[in-house]
Image: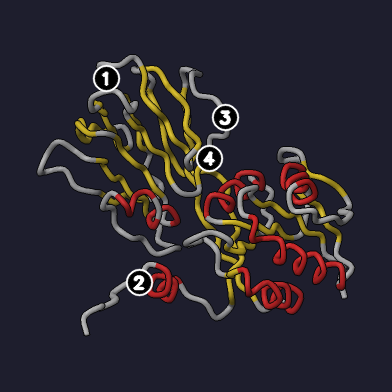
Amino acid sequence: MKQLCFAIFGNSYQANKSSCIHELIALLEERNARLFIDSTFYQYLTSELSIHFSPEGLIEGSDFCADFVISMGGDGTFLEAARRVGNKGIPVLGINMGRLGFLSDYQSEDIASAIEHIYNGTYRIEERSLLMVEDHSGNIQGYPYALNEVAVLKHDNSSMISIDVEINGEFLTTYQADGLIVNTATGSTGYALSVGGPIIAPGSDIIGLVPIAPHSLTVRPLTLSADAEVSMEVKSRSDNFMLSIDGRSESALVGTKILIKKAPHTIKVLKRSEGSFFRTLRNKLMWGADTRE
């Protein structure tokens, strides 16, 4: 049996993961796997949950290498794991410990079968596109890639903002709204869905442009080619607006010009060989459910 290397990430606010991490570590140690774990997660497990084991190393930042990444948590944890993977091309296995966990095919009770699938090779890999944010003014800091969405938002205490939008250099319109989301197919079931955006099946070569509370009856969500370049400039009575990249928010100056386009790399998501996106829609979003008796 080939010795595999795993990098494990998790969040630090779900105490019910104690038995799950015990099971995961035991299964991997049985197979003589090399284990690396996020240092913050390891500290939480040892100090708060009194789980003691000896990984081969602790992960700081994005400096690691592995055959597989395991994300233990909800969609937020998965997005953080994907951010840490970056352009390494390491498949990410999500084990859902949260409420919905739409990005994860496996639940906490499926840990044994998930590890079995990895070692038997009975899984499939989905390549998920990312968005990349460019800011030529240099005002925006941090990781510029989004697996789900990029959103420009008003500050909580400000009035709605005006967003001038161009697509591939051609003026589209000025949105008067609380914000605007540019989302991938992966992100179509996240924030964009909650404000009325369309669900986009994985593998579809399109992105969404979804306004948040637009002050117009004629403004609706729009889908674009995944190769489209979306540029935005925000105007507001406030001096600042919020830029959110997969939920990581920072303040930006009004007048900052933002360019959003397809990233040069993808994220590999490990899925069940027998799973399907539409089954997930039915099971997790109750798609088409009829509660009438």
Mark sitting earlier along the chain (2/3): 3
Q: Are marks 1 and 4 in contact (CB under 8 Å)?
A: no
Between marks 2 and 1 in the image, the one whose residue lies nearer the viewer: 2
Q: CA distance from mark 2 to mark 4?
A: 30 Å
Dot 3 falls on a residue whose secondary structure is loop
Type of amino acid under label 3: Gly
Give me the residue at 34% from left, 18% from top.
254
Q: Position of residue 68 (x, y in %)?
A: 72, 60
Residue at the disc numbered 4: 145
40 versus 259 height, above or below: below
Q: Are marks 4 and 3 in contact (CB under 8 Å)?
A: no
Residue at the disc numbered 2: 286
Dot 2 falls on a residue whose secondary structure is loop
For the residue pair 167 and 208, the one nearer the viewer reads as: 208
Type of amino acid under label 2: Met
Residue at the disc numbered 3: 142
Give me the residue at 71% from left, 76% from top.
112
Q: On the picture, is 18 further left or further right than 217?
A: right
Residue at the disc numbered 1: 236
Type of amino acid under label 1: Ser
Q: CA distance from mark 2 to mark 3?
A: 36 Å
